[in-house]
Structures are given as structure tokens and as C-alpha cells.
Amino acid sequence: MRCFVAAIPPDDALDDLDRFLEPRRDAAPFRWTAPEQVHLTFAFLGEVAEYQLDELGERLARAAARRRPVDVRIAGGGAFPHVAGARVLWAGLELAEEAGALELRRAAEGARAAANRTGVVVDGQRFRPHLTVARCGRPTELTRWVQLLDAYRGPAWRVGALALVESHLGEGPRGRPRYEVLEEYPLG
């Protein structure tokens, strides 16, 4: 199974972001992420064997229990790898308190450690809290789109759990992945 560990924003936060982006979608030179697929990724996991799920779940539950919930809102944005030649357009997170950034980073570290100790390979990318809202087929200049996202500030919500999500490649609309939450592990 292809899996990742993430926080799933509540529907009201995703609906607000979707309403903000909707009138602008037709002018975009890229492929938008479906609202139901927007999430805050803590760890990309390699192949997870079915026999590893129980142990992985136990370790993720322990890692989540060590962290506390964090109040955030979707605000601002950016592009990866850089705005002048972007492949990904993302919305950022505004944290209600400064200590929230440390909690999110430690939640990501805990999720990665849980996977590693279970024997699951973890993508080596450094944790950068963001929500992918669009992908480009080729490097694209996205300064205007990042400036647009900089004007956005959504409703507050709480990151209160880590979710183990399975990605079913090619099973979603237009050949995109379909995501299935296998289990959620409360923070705190």
C-alpha cells in the first residue's frame, strides 16, 4: 500500500478555501487539487505491507499522544521548488501561537520515527507545513498566484489528530489518486 500521514482540515475550512479559489480556476495554467484531497502532510511513506499496519498504527498512536492539538488557519501561500519555476502551488498555515510550529514539526518527526521503527521507508523531504492546492505539468511562473493566496485568510481550525491515509493511484476522478483514511490518532 502507498500511504502517508496527514492532518485533514475540516470541511468548513476546505469549503472556504474552495469558494475563494473557485472564480479563479479557469484562468489557471495548472491542475487544481480537488478539495477533498487537500491535507497537511506529515510524512510520505513508501510501500506499507499489510502485516505492518498494526504495528505502524500502535506507533503512530503513541507519537500522536505525545503532541498537543494546534490551532491554525489556512493563510498565505507559496510555490515549490520556487515561484519562478514552480511545480506546486500551496496554501500556507497561520498558527494561533508560536509554539504551534514546534508541535507540528515534532508531530511530523514522530510520524516519521513511527514509520522507520516499523520498517517502512519514509520520504526524506524536510517537513514544511503547507496544503497543496495545485500542480503544474512543467515549471511555471506563479508569482501572481502566490500573491493571490497571500491575500487569503480562512477560518480557524484545530489540528487534533494524525491520520494514516492510503493513496489509491489512478482510482480518483480523471485518473488522479483516491485517498482513504485508514485510521486517525488523536493528539494529546
Image (cartoon, rainbow, N blue to C red):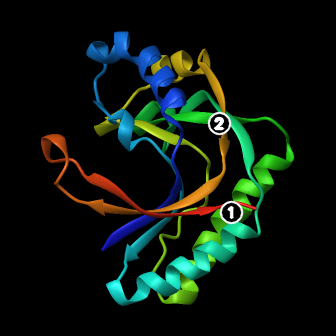
Q: Which residue is mark 2?
A: 93
Q: Where does the N terminus fall, quadrant-wise?
A: bottom left
Q: Residues within 10 Å of mark 1 (few under 14, many from 20)?
A: many
Could you say which quadrant of the image residue 31 lies in? top left
Q: Which residue is mark 1?
A: 107
Q: Residue furthest left?
A: 174
Which of 4 and 82 lies nearest the eye of the viewer? 4
Is the residue 30 above or below the residue 99 in the image? above
Residue 53 appearing in the image:
yes
Residue at point 62%, 73% (across, down): 61
Amino acid under label 1?
A: Ala
Amino acid under label 2?
A: Leu
Tell me the number on the disc at residue 69.
none
Q: CA distance from mark 2 to mark 1?
A: 15 Å
Residue 70 location in percent, x, y? 74, 47
Local SS, label 1: helix
Could you say which quadrant of the image residue 78 lies in? top right
